[in-house]
Amino acid sequence: MSDIIFEERKDQIHVKGEGPFKLACNRDSLAGAVSQRACVFCGSRVVLYPIADALHLVHGPIGCAAYTWDIRGALSSGPELHRLSFSTDLQETDVIFGGEKKLYAALTELIDRHQPKAAFVYSTCIVGIIGDDLAAVCKKVSAEKGIPVIPVQSEGFKGNKREGYLAACKAMFTLMGTGDTSDISPISLNILGDFNLAGEIWIIREYFERMGIQVVANITGDGRVGDIARAHGAALNVVQCSGSTMDLAKMMKDAYGTPVVKVSYFGIEDMAEALYAVARFFKDKDPDMLARTQALVKEELAVLYPKLSQFRKDLEGKKAAIYVGGAFKAFSLIKAFRHLGMSVAIAGSQTGTPEDYEELASICDPGTIIIDDANPLELSHYLKEKDVDIFVGGVKERPIAFKLGVGFCDHNHERKEALEGFVGMYNFALEVHRTVMSPVWRFVPRRAGKALAESLDDLPKECAL
Amino acid sequence: MSSQSDIADATAVLDAEAGPLKPKPEPFVSTTNACKLCKPLGATLVFKGIEGGVPYLHGSQGCATYMRRYIISHFREPMDIASSSLGEKQAIYGGGPNLKKGLLTVMDKYGAGMIGVATTCLTETIGDDVPGILMEFRREFADLGVAPVVNVSTPSYSGTHMEGFTAAVRAVADQLATADAKTAAVNCFPGFVSCEDIRHLKDVFASFGLTATILPDYSETLDGPAVEDYEKIPSGGTPVKAIKAMGAAPATFEFGRTLSEPGEAATAGGLLASRFGVPLKRLGLPIGLRETDAFFKSLESVSCKPTPRRRALERGRLLDAFVDGHKYVSQKRCVIYGEEDLIVGLTSFMAEIGVIPVLVAGGGRSGRLEKAVRAACEGLVPEMPEVAEGVDFYDIADRARELAPDFFLGHSKGYRLAREMNVPLVRVGFPIHDRFGGQRLRHLCYQGAQELLDRVVNAMIETKQTGSDIGYGYI
Ligand code: SF4
Ligand code: SF4
């Protein structure tokens, strides 16, 4: 391996087919390596943030709140409290004498001002150190204001995003079991692990409604506190395979016996399979559902296929790289690229588990680089080595691709294009096509340089001067 | 720090916030939509502007990642910030070992020519003695010939990203500058300006026959050309060698009207003056006519050359445009917000062209904003603008709704408010992440004023045009 790879990280990179599959993961990031990862706080913020009628107060210094102010694309059909950035903006005196008083005052003030249905209070690194008793303050304010005020134990240094997901799930679970479930149909479900980026959950909800299913709670895209409070009344939890809300589904299963199906809404097979899995679940209660679902899928594909084949003509044989937050998304992306006639040469994630990577390896082509918790040096190295045509990732990955003259598709929480569902597959293909087929790459030095070398023989032999 | 004047200032701000007719509101405890960023962010920008420099955050991984994300969204360039990636164990037992290991990693893999270490809230609170750890580090690894490491203390619970920026510039001068080398280059500490501004400043110095050591200089590192290969550390930046020679420079130009008093060594310029006797020219950011005139005057005196014809023509064209454009903007009311030095400069410029700044608001708390804004407006506006320090967008929105400005002048974060009020936002400053090319906007000197003027005038014309029922095609 190249000298780009850190000695300590060698076992976090695997080339499929070279030796038995083993990948180290879920490790602390290496000090000094520019990890693409965020923190626990980031994880819980991602999950809880789309709950639009709750107050989201970041207890800490200003940065943690400022950097997460309305950067994501989670849409709401009603209230938009989630798009504001609230912080206790801790100052030196608070750090010395403790921030509980300020937290109490801030919470009281903000609840009075905005009348939220609940409040989430996120603790940040510094709060973990000064030891503010978040739970006690929340309990007090909750009693005074009569709404749930929920501490989220998300001190950034206590791990990576995954711990944040768990903290978020624990926080949401405290809401459950408190709402009225009397009007919930036996054919009903909760959507977990979708954040309504660019309105995606609306697409998925519509499919389920067309199948004849009541959607009880969106967790958490376009989410409402009241819906989550009665989510335990739903017959099924459908968890999108992002890993972020699986913990909540487990808690609900243990406490309320709610069954779980794991799905993905990205790409054709996975989207269709998601709907079929749900239809199969309800087949005893509604024998016609499967047929209705088949009709739905057929109808959607009839629109989608001809459009995709247009793209495929151009994209056939091109290569892609994937580096995303959760490993599950990578599975669907690999399949989606295959539909476009493309192969995936690099697949990685920030927070995959051993099982995730196992599965990832099983669907990858031989020679694919599988990588955990990468950094710009490694990413740029492999992008070049594999000479890919497109890179799928987030904001931090984008400039790396562009610098190397590689197309890019934003597939993270900041995206503003819906990529889920059948229409999402179309949007994805369109975006891939737009970037891969752009003429600009021909002029980028790395590519143009190559072309130049190839055409050196064509240079005029004689010079007029 | 005089507490008396602090109280007086605070009261003045509250009075201003209350507006003339309203009772004094209770001061808010919480922050909603901050008009500032955190301290280490400013420091990382400074370190990124040094040749071979890698910014390094001593803290948990999240801070570095968030700041990278944020900075990338403005500059659209790679922004690698290394981190100590502290976990729970280090948070309890101290981050020293991780810091040392991280520094070695960065030197090894990146081949850093300089590493700038900024602390975070976490490492400040657990009390890591970074200078001490670095001393040990240098001792332990002396045989490796380690790159220079500069450190700055940047706890966000006391200050904004601009204070982090200023502190980092000072730390670099403090820890690297000597009086040993001979140099003819003047020093320039421009503050947080755009990449295009830095490039323009170099041109301006050059047209007076001067070479300037501009610190920081991220004009290439954060706005680089397309190149053949991925550069681990992009080329460009202030050369470390030039920084080392700063103590022998014939003069220092330092921009900013809300920096500490010039006599103090609290800024890089003050420090070089007091330690090495480098004459200090303390000026406002050269935004608009008068501040640029002042800058050019001092360039004339340092270079002993008159303003070259080319620049004089730029000035003349600007004045011509003042006249051509004045009716479109005269008596338009605007709200200006953002970083303190920048908004002082913008206010000064708006006052010159007849725009009435009705509210000038910043997230910082230097205690010097009000005075600087007053000085900038003196004699030009019918009424002094309200000045608000330490405010967030909740406060700004509150006042703006009452003041009903014709436009906003500031960074992208005011968009929501401008949209709500259905008035244009002329984007200036950082971050600009809802438009393209924020790093290439020019604000400084006559040319910068020209470009800003064009944008403001066009915003007013566009408003009139789109607001008219018949859509005038000729305005
Ligand atoms: S902890 Fe401090 S340094 Fe880190 S992001 Fe938050 S405010 Fe900034
Ligand atoms: S301080 Fe902690 S919680 Fe805040 S951004 Fe940094 S790592 Fe995350």
Image: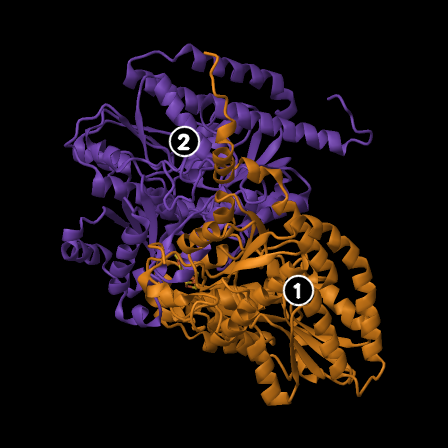
Chain colours: A orange, B purple
Q: Is mark 2 within 8 Å of ligand 1?
A: no
**Image location of residue A132, percent across then percent down:** 40, 72
Q: Chain of mark 2?
A: B
| Label 2, residues with CA under 10 Å away: few <14, some 14-19, many ≥20 | many
Taking the spot 79% from the left edge, 88% from the top edge, the residue there is A284
Can the viewer see residue B431 in this picture?
no
Give left or right: position of A332 versus A279: left
Q: Position of residue B32 (x, y in %)?
A: 54, 56
Quarter of the image with the C terminus of chain A is: top left
Spatial separation of the CA atoms under disc 1 and disc 2: 45 Å
Please report, as a chain letter, where disc 1 is located.
Answer: A
Location of residue A143 in the rendering, given as x and y in whole percent from the top left corner? 56, 79
In the image, taking residue B470 as reference, residue A266 lies left or right, namely left
In percent of width and height, residue A17 lies at 47, 68
Residue picked out by circle 1: A266
Q: Which residue is labeled 2 in the image?
A: B198
Please tell me whether mark 2 sits on a helix, a strand or a loop. Answer: helix
Image quarter for ligand 2: bottom left
The disc labelled 2 sits on which kind of residue? Answer: Ile
Q: How many marks?
A: 2
- Can residue A394 be spotted in the picture? yes
Give the numbered dot on residue A405: none
Label 1: few (<14), some (14–19) or many (≥20) C-alpha neighbours in 10 Å: many
Residue B446 vertical placement versus A297 (above, below) = above
Single out the mark in the foreground, 1 or 2: 1
Q: Residue at x 38, y 46 (%)?
A: B232
User: What is the quadrant of residue A49 in the picture?
Assistant: bottom right
Q: Secondary structure at mark 1?
A: loop
